Amino acid sequence: MKRRLMLLTLGTSLLLARLPAHAAERGTAEEAMAMAKKAIAYLKANGREKAFAEINDPRGQFTDRDLYVVVYDLNGKNLAHGQNARMIGKDLIDIRDGDGKYYMRERIEIIKTKGKGWQDYKFLDPLTKKIEPKSMYIEKYEDLIVGCGIYKPD
C-alpha cells in the first residue's frame, strides 16, 4: 500500500512538473522586449561585427526557445537573424506575410515615425513549423532596426 501511494505521488509530481515546462516553451512579450534591449546594449558595447555574430548563433544568448533577435537596416535588408541564417543579407522590403501584408515596409514606418513599438503579422513558428500570428517588439538603434518577437499560436 505504501509503495503504491509512493508511486502514485511520484507519478503525480512528475506530471505536475511537466505542466510549467510546457507553458515555458514560449517566450513572453516582456522577455522579447528585454532581449531586443539586451541586443542593443550588446551592440553598443561590442560593435556590429561581434554583435551580429552573437545574434546569428542559434545557441547564443540571443536565442531562447521561440525567441530570437533579428536586425535590419532602414531599407529592409536583414543583417542578423537568430533563427534562419539564410535570411542574412537579403533585401526584404517587398516580403509579405501569409495575409499579403508588407510587414517589412510597416516595420520601417514604425521605426521612422515612433522609434520603437510592437508590430503584428504572421510568420513561420520554429516550434510548430506553421505560419502563426506573431508580435514583434522593434526598436531603432543608430541606423538599425533591432527586434524580437513572440508567437501566438491559436
Image (cartoon, rainbow, N blue to C red):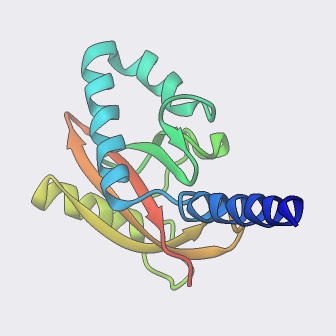
Is 151 positioned to the left or the right of 44 in the image?
right
Q: Residue, x 33% and y 16% (percent of image)?
A: 47
Total numbered circles: 0
Is 133 positioned to the left or the right of 87 in the image?
left
Q: Residue, x 39% and y 62% (percent of image)?
A: 104
Give the vertical position of 34 relative to 101 (above or below): above
Q: Is residue 81 visible?
A: no
Taking depth in this image into account, of 123 and 31 the one nearest to the observer is 31
Quarter of the view holding residue 72: top left
Give the vertical position of 37 relative to 129 (above or below): above
Seen as rendered, the residue at the extreme left is 114
Give the vertical position of 84 relative to 97 (above or below): above
Q: Residue, x 40% and y 51% (percent of image)?
A: 148
Taking depth in this image into account, of 61 and 39 the one nearest to the observer is 61
Task: Give how far across and how far down residue 33 sits, in percent.
Answer: 30, 50
Quarter of the view holding residue 3: bottom right
Q: Is residue 22 visible?
A: yes
